[in-house]
Image (spheres, coloured by chain):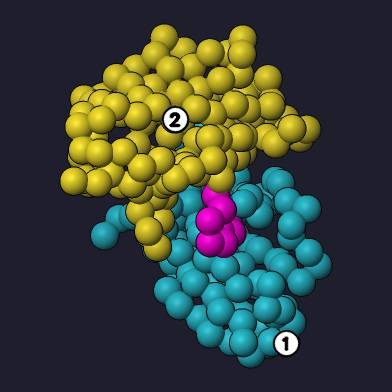
Chain colours: A cyan, B yellow
Amino acid sequence: DTGVSQNPRHKITKRGQNVTFRCDPISEHNRLYWYRQTLGQGPEFLTYFQNEAQLEKSRLLSDRFSAERPKGSFSTLEIQRTEQGDSAMYLCASSLTWDRRNTEAFFGQGTRLTVV
Amino acid sequence: RKEVEQDPGPFNVPEGATVAFNCTYSNSASQSFFWYRQDCRKEPKLLMSVYSSGNEDGRFTAQLNRASQYISLLIRDSKLSDSATYLCVVNGRENSGYSTLTFGKGTMLLVSP
Protein backbone atom coordinates (compact mmCIF):
# COMPACT_ATOMS: atom_id res chain seq x y z
CA ASP A 1 0.00 0.00 0.00
CA THR A 2 1.60 3.25 -1.10
CA GLY A 3 -0.96 5.57 0.44
CA VAL A 4 -0.70 7.67 3.59
CA SER A 5 -0.41 5.48 6.66
CA GLN A 6 -1.28 6.48 10.23
CA ASN A 7 -0.66 4.62 13.45
CA PRO A 8 -2.30 3.76 15.70
CA ARG A 9 -5.81 3.73 14.24
CA HIS A 10 -7.38 4.06 17.66
CA LYS A 11 -6.03 5.31 20.97
CA ILE A 12 -7.79 5.44 24.32
CA THR A 13 -5.91 7.25 27.02
CA LYS A 14 -6.52 8.62 30.48
CA ARG A 15 -6.65 12.33 31.00
CA GLY A 16 -3.22 13.72 31.78
CA GLN A 17 -1.30 11.09 29.81
CA ASN A 18 0.89 11.84 26.82
CA VAL A 19 0.16 10.33 23.42
CA THR A 20 2.11 10.20 20.17
CA PHE A 21 0.77 9.52 16.69
CA ARG A 22 2.75 8.64 13.61
CA CYS A 23 2.14 9.45 9.95
CA ASP A 24 3.96 7.98 6.96
CA PRO A 25 3.17 10.08 3.88
CA ILE A 26 3.29 9.05 0.25
CA SER A 27 7.01 8.72 -0.37
CA GLU A 28 7.56 11.42 -2.99
CA HIS A 29 5.33 13.99 -1.29
CA ASN A 30 7.19 16.93 0.19
CA ARG A 31 4.28 18.46 2.11
CA LEU A 32 2.66 16.90 5.15
CA TYR A 33 -0.38 18.20 7.02
CA TRP A 34 -1.98 17.44 10.36
CA TYR A 35 -5.68 18.11 10.84
CA ARG A 36 -8.13 17.47 13.65
CA GLN A 37 -11.75 16.59 13.05
CA THR A 38 -14.63 16.33 15.49
CA LEU A 39 -18.12 15.05 14.78
CA GLY A 40 -20.09 17.26 12.41
CA GLN A 41 -17.16 19.48 11.59
CA GLY A 42 -14.76 19.67 8.68
CA PRO A 43 -11.07 18.97 9.26
CA GLU A 44 -9.40 21.80 11.18
CA PHE A 45 -5.84 22.67 10.24
CA LEU A 46 -3.22 22.10 12.94
CA THR A 47 0.17 22.36 11.25
CA TYR A 48 2.10 21.46 8.14
CA PHE A 49 5.62 20.68 7.00
CA GLN A 50 7.42 21.39 3.79
CA ASN A 51 10.03 18.62 3.84
CA GLU A 52 11.41 18.79 7.40
CA ALA A 53 10.50 22.46 8.01
CA GLN A 54 7.37 23.22 10.02
CA LEU A 55 5.94 26.22 8.18
CA GLU A 56 2.61 27.00 9.77
CA LYS A 57 0.95 26.28 13.09
CA SER A 58 -2.68 26.92 13.87
CA ARG A 59 -3.86 28.85 16.90
CA LEU A 60 -5.54 25.55 17.81
CA LEU A 61 -2.14 24.07 18.48
CA SER A 62 -1.56 24.81 22.16
CA ASP A 63 1.75 24.37 23.96
CA ARG A 64 0.72 20.80 24.73
CA PHE A 65 0.91 19.88 21.06
CA SER A 66 4.15 19.35 19.19
CA ALA A 67 4.87 17.92 15.78
CA GLU A 68 8.06 16.83 14.11
CA ARG A 69 9.20 15.59 10.74
CA PRO A 70 12.87 14.95 11.44
CA LYS A 71 14.09 13.74 8.07
CA GLY A 72 11.36 15.05 5.87
CA SER A 73 9.73 11.64 5.71
CA PHE A 74 7.42 10.40 8.50
CA SER A 75 5.96 12.77 11.07
CA THR A 76 4.87 12.49 14.68
CA LEU A 77 2.26 14.46 16.56
CA GLU A 78 2.53 14.45 20.34
CA ILE A 79 -0.08 15.66 22.78
CA GLN A 80 1.08 16.14 26.34
CA ARG A 81 -1.19 16.11 29.39
CA THR A 82 -4.21 15.12 27.34
CA GLU A 83 -7.60 16.66 28.11
CA GLN A 84 -11.06 15.37 27.27
CA GLY A 85 -11.39 18.14 24.72
CA ASP A 86 -8.54 16.56 22.76
CA SER A 87 -10.80 13.64 21.83
CA ALA A 88 -11.08 13.76 18.05
CA MET A 89 -9.92 12.15 14.83
CA TYR A 90 -6.40 13.24 13.95
CA LEU A 91 -5.85 13.18 10.20
CA CYS A 92 -2.59 13.31 8.34
CA ALA A 93 -2.38 14.24 4.68
CA SER A 94 0.41 14.64 2.18
CA SER A 95 0.78 16.37 -1.14
CA LEU A 96 3.32 17.32 -3.74
CA THR A 97 4.12 21.01 -3.89
CA TRP A 98 6.10 22.99 -6.39
CA ASP A 99 6.49 26.71 -6.89
CA ARG A 100 4.41 27.28 -3.73
CA ARG A 101 1.43 25.68 -5.46
CA ASN A 102 -0.29 22.75 -3.87
CA THR A 103 -1.67 19.72 -5.60
CA GLU A 104 -4.46 17.72 -4.06
CA ALA A 105 -3.81 16.21 -0.65
CA PHE A 106 -4.20 12.52 0.11
CA PHE A 107 -5.34 11.57 3.58
CA GLY A 108 -4.53 8.70 5.87
CA GLN A 109 -7.30 6.85 7.65
CA GLY A 110 -6.72 8.86 10.80
CA THR A 111 -6.06 8.14 14.44
CA ARG A 112 -9.14 8.32 16.62
CA LEU A 113 -8.22 9.57 20.09
CA THR A 114 -10.50 9.12 23.05
CA VAL A 115 -9.50 10.73 26.33
CA VAL A 116 -11.31 9.30 29.34
CA ARG B 1 -16.57 35.81 7.82
CA LYS B 2 -15.44 32.21 7.96
CA GLU B 3 -12.56 31.29 5.68
CA VAL B 4 -14.55 28.65 3.84
CA GLU B 5 -18.31 28.54 4.25
CA GLN B 6 -20.66 25.90 2.92
CA ASP B 7 -24.42 25.35 2.82
CA PRO B 8 -25.58 23.84 6.09
CA GLY B 9 -27.08 20.40 5.57
CA PRO B 10 -28.22 17.81 5.40
CA PHE B 11 -29.65 17.68 1.90
CA ASN B 12 -32.24 14.91 1.55
CA VAL B 13 -32.97 14.05 -2.08
CA PRO B 14 -34.55 11.12 -3.92
CA GLU B 15 -32.57 8.99 -6.33
CA GLY B 16 -32.26 10.63 -9.71
CA ALA B 17 -32.49 14.18 -8.38
CA THR B 18 -30.07 16.97 -9.20
CA VAL B 19 -28.46 18.66 -6.21
CA ALA B 20 -26.17 21.67 -5.97
CA PHE B 21 -23.75 22.61 -3.21
CA ASN B 22 -22.42 26.10 -2.71
CA CYS B 23 -19.25 27.33 -1.09
CA THR B 24 -17.76 30.77 -0.51
CA TYR B 25 -14.23 31.64 0.56
CA SER B 26 -12.77 34.76 2.12
CA ASN B 27 -9.13 34.73 0.97
CA SER B 28 -8.99 36.43 -2.40
CA ALA B 29 -5.41 35.17 -2.86
CA SER B 30 -6.60 31.57 -2.94
CA GLN B 31 -5.14 29.65 -5.83
CA SER B 32 -6.54 26.12 -5.91
CA PHE B 33 -9.92 24.72 -5.15
CA PHE B 34 -11.16 21.20 -4.57
CA TRP B 35 -14.20 19.21 -3.62
CA TYR B 36 -13.58 16.28 -1.31
CA ARG B 37 -16.00 13.55 -0.34
CA GLN B 38 -16.05 12.02 3.13
CA ASP B 39 -17.99 8.89 4.02
CA CYS B 40 -19.07 8.32 7.61
CA ARG B 41 -16.05 7.63 9.86
CA LYS B 42 -13.70 7.56 6.88
CA GLU B 43 -11.01 9.92 5.68
CA PRO B 44 -11.73 12.64 3.10
CA LYS B 45 -11.00 11.68 -0.51
CA LEU B 46 -10.59 13.96 -3.48
CA LEU B 47 -13.68 14.12 -5.65
CA MET B 48 -12.49 16.71 -8.13
CA SER B 49 -10.37 19.79 -8.55
CA VAL B 50 -12.14 22.99 -9.55
CA TYR B 51 -10.80 25.01 -12.48
CA SER B 52 -11.58 28.56 -13.49
CA SER B 53 -13.20 27.42 -16.71
CA GLY B 54 -15.42 24.96 -14.88
CA ASN B 55 -15.03 21.23 -15.22
CA GLU B 56 -17.14 18.14 -15.47
CA ASP B 57 -16.54 14.54 -14.49
CA GLY B 58 -19.44 12.31 -15.39
CA ARG B 59 -22.42 13.34 -13.28
CA PHE B 60 -20.39 15.92 -11.36
CA THR B 61 -19.82 19.51 -12.46
CA ALA B 62 -17.71 22.04 -10.56
CA GLN B 63 -17.75 25.78 -11.14
CA LEU B 64 -15.56 28.59 -9.84
CA ASN B 65 -16.34 32.30 -9.78
CA ARG B 66 -13.23 34.14 -8.61
CA ALA B 67 -14.89 37.58 -8.68
CA SER B 68 -17.58 36.41 -6.24
CA GLN B 69 -15.22 33.99 -4.43
CA TYR B 70 -17.76 31.26 -4.95
CA ILE B 71 -17.48 27.57 -5.79
CA SER B 72 -20.24 25.13 -6.63
CA LEU B 73 -20.69 21.42 -7.13
CA LEU B 74 -23.59 20.00 -9.12
CA ILE B 75 -24.50 16.33 -8.93
CA ARG B 76 -26.91 15.05 -11.57
CA ASP B 77 -28.92 11.83 -11.44
CA SER B 78 -28.11 11.21 -7.77
CA LYS B 79 -27.30 7.65 -6.73
CA LEU B 80 -27.68 6.06 -3.32
CA SER B 81 -23.90 5.74 -3.28
CA ASP B 82 -23.56 9.54 -3.48
CA SER B 83 -24.69 9.78 0.14
CA ALA B 84 -21.74 11.33 1.97
CA THR B 85 -20.43 14.65 3.26
CA TYR B 86 -19.01 16.98 0.61
CA LEU B 87 -16.17 19.22 1.71
CA CYS B 88 -15.17 22.41 -0.06
CA VAL B 89 -11.41 22.95 0.15
CA VAL B 90 -9.46 26.08 -0.67
CA ASN B 91 -5.72 26.45 -1.04
CA GLY B 92 -4.97 29.92 0.26
CA ARG B 93 -1.78 31.88 0.65
CA GLU B 94 -0.95 32.61 4.28
CA ASN B 95 1.02 35.54 5.71
CA SER B 96 4.16 33.47 5.50
CA GLY B 97 3.81 33.39 1.75
CA TYR B 98 3.20 29.68 1.81
CA SER B 99 -0.16 28.12 1.29
CA THR B 100 -2.26 25.62 3.15
CA LEU B 101 -5.51 23.79 2.58
CA THR B 102 -8.57 25.10 4.42
CA PHE B 103 -11.71 23.00 4.68
CA GLY B 104 -15.33 24.00 5.02
CA LYS B 105 -17.52 22.23 7.57
CA GLY B 106 -19.00 20.06 4.87
CA THR B 107 -22.51 19.49 3.57
CA MET B 108 -24.10 16.13 4.14
CA LEU B 109 -26.05 14.56 1.29
CA LEU B 110 -28.56 11.78 1.90
CA VAL B 111 -29.97 10.12 -1.21
CA SER B 112 -33.03 7.97 -0.59
CA PRO B 113 -34.69 5.29 -2.76
Is B65 colored magenta in this rendering?
Answer: no
Real-space Cα separation, disc 1 to disc 2, in angstroms: 42 Å
Who is closer to the viewer here, B95 or B109? Answer: B109
Tag 1 residue: A16
Tag 2 residue: B21
Which quarter of the image is occupied by the C terminus of chain A?
A: bottom right
The magenta region covers: A35-42
The residue type indicated by label 2 comes to Phe
Above or below, A5 relative to A44: below
Instruction: Residue at 73%, 51% (x, y): give it.
Output: A58
- Relative image position of residue B94 (x, y in whole percent): 72, 33
Few, some or many residues within 10 Å of mark 2 (<14, 14–19, 20+): many
Instruction: Find residue A35 and report its image quarter.
Output: bottom right
Q: Do the numbered discs 1 and 2 sit on residues whose CB atoms are within 8 Å?
A: no
Outermost residue on the right side: it is A63
- Magenta segment's dominant SS is loop
Q: Is residue B36 left or right of residue B71?
A: left
Instruction: Find residue A2 and report its image quarter.
Output: bottom left
Which chain hosts label 2? B
